[in-house]
Image (cartoon, rainbow, N blue to C red):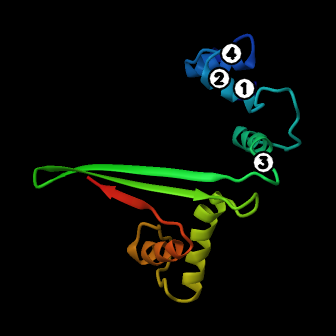
Amino acid sequence: MKSFLPAASIKKTLPESVAHMCGLPVEGEAMTKVIWTGIFDDVKTGIKNASPAMILQHLLEQKWKLQADDKDMIVMQHQFEYVLNGDNHKIISSLIVKGDDQTYTAMAKTVGLPLGITAKLVLEGKIKLTGVCIPVMREIYEPVLAELALAGIVFEEKES
């Protein structure tokens, strides 16, 4: 990892070098969490020609692997503030999705399921767009959100 750091940032230890480069105290909370990942450990990953991102992914997959009785949860909240006709408004849009087990995770429900629904809609001819499309297009997001709602994945909105 040291080979990826600028020469000017090299200190006594690798954690000190990274902390110095990021302007963080080595003993601080952020560096403690980075050290916990194992990124500074002198252990071979077994990945040839690995980039720093590939190494970090490998380490986190080991640390974050769900056990048989673990469940994940996604919590997301968007807050929108705007002025309309001189009045202040705020919309809070919240989503909580709980995984069923280590296979049917909340992450799979919120990432894989929308992709699968989109693929199904394309194959069924219900989405007729061609080329590279993004999900902010009404023809994509409306039917996908409708199917996600049937699966219980829906944002709750409160307006004030």
Q: Residues within 10 Å of mark 3 (few under 14, many from 20)?
A: few
Q: Which residue is mark 2?
A: 31
Q: Position of residue 99 (x, y in %)?
A: 66, 59
Asked whether disc 1 touches disc 2, contact meaning CB atoms under 8 Å apart, the reply is yes
Amino acid carrying mark 4 in the image: Glu
Q: Nearer the viewer, residue 47 or 116?
A: 116
Amino acid carrying mark 2 in the image: Met
Q: Which mark is residue 16?
A: 4
Tag nearer the camera, 2 or 4: 2
Q: CA distance from mark 2 to mark 3?
A: 22 Å
Q: Which residue is mark 1?
A: 35
Amino acid carrying mark 3 in the image: Lys
Q: CA distance from mark 2 to mark 4?
A: 9 Å
Residue at disc 1, secondary structure: helix
Asked whether disc 3 touches disc 4, contact meaning CB atoms under 8 Å apart, the reply is no
Q: Position of residue 81 (x, y in %)?
A: 27, 48
Asked whether disc 2 touches disc 4, contact meaning CB atoms under 8 Å apart, the reply is no
Q: Residues within 10 Å of mark 2 (few under 14, many from 20)?
A: some
Mark found first going from the N terminus, 2 or 3? 2
Q: Position of residue 44 (x, y in %)?
A: 88, 35
Q: Which residue is mark 3?
A: 65
